Image (spheres, rainbow, N blue to C red):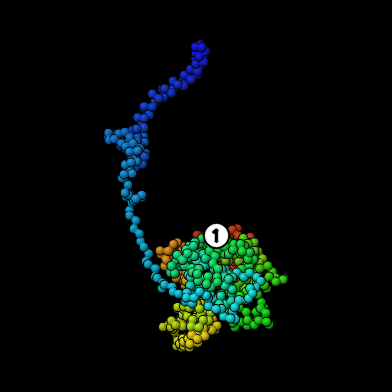
Amino acid sequence: MMRTVSNRVLPLAARYGSVLLAAVLVYYVIREPLNAAVSSISFPAKGGFHTTGPGNNQDGLPVLGGEDVQGKEQLGPAGAAEGVREKNSHEPMGEGDATKYVKKYKPDPIPFAPIGDHFPWLTHSESPPPVPENNLPPHPHVDEATPLLIGFTRNWPLLLQCVSSYIAAGWPPEDIYVVENTGTFHANRNQQLDLQNPFFLNHTALGILGVKVVSTPTLLSFSQLQNFFLHLALERDWPFFWWSHMDVLVLSDEDVKKNDRDHDWDHDPYATIYERCVGLLRYLNGPDMPPWATHFFAFDHLALVNRDAYLEVGAWDTQIPYYSSDCDMYLRLHWAGYWQPQSEAGLIFDVASVLDDIAALFRVPGSHATFKGDPVYVGASDGSSEDERAHHEADLKREKDMYPWVEKEGETFAHLVEVAGRMQDLKWVDEGLRRNEWQSRQTGGQTDPFYRDSEGFAAGLETLVDAGRRVFADKWGHRGCDLLAMGIEGKDAWRLERDWDIRESPGSIGGNWGKDWMTGSSDLN
C-alpha cells in the first residue's frame, strides 16, 4: 500500500515542485521590497505629478507616503484624499483661488398694462351671444367635414377674438378646433395659469362657445405644428381641412358683389365666409380640375389644405422651424405639379389689437367696437396738416354719432369693417416694425407651473428663426424665397453651391429675404 502511494506522489512532486519553490521565493523575497517602495510614494500638494523637487525622486516621479528628502512624513493615498476633502468641505467646487464672478442684470423690461376681460358676456353667461341671423351656419350640416384648425401659443384675448369672429361670421363652432401649443401640458385645463401668463388659455370659455380644444404633447415649432395638423387630419379621417392664423379678425362680406362663381346667387343672394369656403372646396374637387394642394384666402391667413398632397411631398420640413418654412413647403408642392390658387371668401384682417368688447362682433346692443390705440381717439399728431386735423375731427364726430345707435341696436357691418381696417393699419404702421409685439404683451405668471420669461422666450424664438433661414439658404443655395425667379427646382435641394460668400454674411442675412415665393415680388406676409 505505501509503495503504491509513493509511486503516485513522486511524479507529482517532480512536476509541481519547481512551481511551489518559485511561489515561496516570490512571497518571501519580492513582497517586502515591493511594499516598502509603494509606501514611500505620496501625492504632491500642488503642481503636476512629474515635477522634480522635494518629495519627488530624481526621475521626477511623485512620491506617495514615506518621508521626503527633508525627512518630513508624507501622507499615503487615503490620508492625502482625506486631507483634500477636509480642506474643501466648505468650499464650492471651482471657487478655490478663482476671481469671484459678478452677475450683471439687464434692465427691467418696460411692463405692459395687465390684460382685462375682453368678453364680459362670456364671463357672466353660460351661453354665447346669438349669431346674427343672416350668418347662421347651414342646418343640417353640409355633407363635407369642414374642420378649421387655429393654433395657439400666446395671447389669449387675441385668440378669443379670432375664434369669436369666425363664429359670428357663420363658421359652425363645433367645427373649430383650437390647437393648444403652449407646452404647459394640463396646466390650462386644470386652471393653474394666471390670466397675465402669456400661455394662459381659458378652456371653459371656449367650451361655452362650442369650440373644441386639442393639445399638442409638447411645445412645437410652426412647421412641427403644421405636421401635427396633418396628423390630426389622418387620425380623424379629414381629407381636407382649413387652418387660420390666430392674429386675424374675419367678417362675412355682407356687401359682396354678385360675381362669385362658387355660389348659387339665383337661389341665395348672400353667402357667409363659411358657405363660400365650402363652395370653393366643391369647386376644387369638381370634374376636370387639376390636382391641387392649397387654396389661399388672403395668402395663408386662412388656407384650405389637401392633406394627401402635403403628405405626398414629405410634409413640412421641421429643420426650418419658423419663417421661410412656408416658402419651402409651398414651393415643393408647386414643383410637384400641384395647383395652389388664391381667391376671396370674406373679409380677413391681419390685426394685433383686440376689441374692448368682443361681443360687438355679434352685434350685441351696448357692445361697442373700440380698441386701445385707435388713432381716431388718440388724436392727430402735432405735425398734422390742417386738412388732416379736419379729417380726424370728422372721424371722431362720426364715432360719437354712432354711439346711441350701437347702445340700442348693436354694431353695424359697415362700422365693423371700418374699425377692423384701422386695427390692421395700426399693426402695419412703420412698415410693420412692431407687428409681432402682441406675442409678448403678457408678462405675468412667475409663480405658475412651466413659467417662461416672456422676453427670454421671444429671444429664443428669434434664434430659431435665424437658424431656420440659414437651413433654408443652405438647402437651396440661395438667401430668400424667390427660388422660382432664380430658376431653382425641387431636385436642387442640398445640391447647389451657395450663391453668396458665407464669410461676408450668414444665410439668414442679406440676399432676397422679404420676396414672395410666388412671383419674387414683395412678401405677402
Q: In the image, what residue type sits under mark 1?
A: Gln
Rendered location of residue 513, percent (x, y): 54, 67
Depth check, front residue: 383 or 504: 383
- Determine which residue is flagged by label 1: 319
How many other residues sit within 10 Å of disc 1, few (<14), some (14-19) or many (≥20)? some
Q: Is residue 59 visible?
A: yes
Q: Secondary structure at mark 1?
A: loop
How many numbered discs sit on the rendered protein? Answer: 1
Left of 300 or right of it: where is 291? right
Rendered location of residue 307, percent (x, y): 63, 65
Q: Is residue 363 above or below residue 484?
A: below
Q: Quadrant of the C terminus?
A: bottom right
Q: Is residue 279 above or below residue 466?
A: below
Left of 195 or right of it: where is 417? right
Depth check, front residue: 366 or 35: 366
Q: Residue furthest front?
A: 126
**Which quadrant would residue 71 be assigned to in this image?**
top left
Identify which residue is drawn at 36% across, 63% down: 105
Q: Residue furthest right?
A: 288
**Which quadrant would residue 27 be assigned to in this image?**
top left
Rendered location of residue 227, percent (x, y): 58, 62
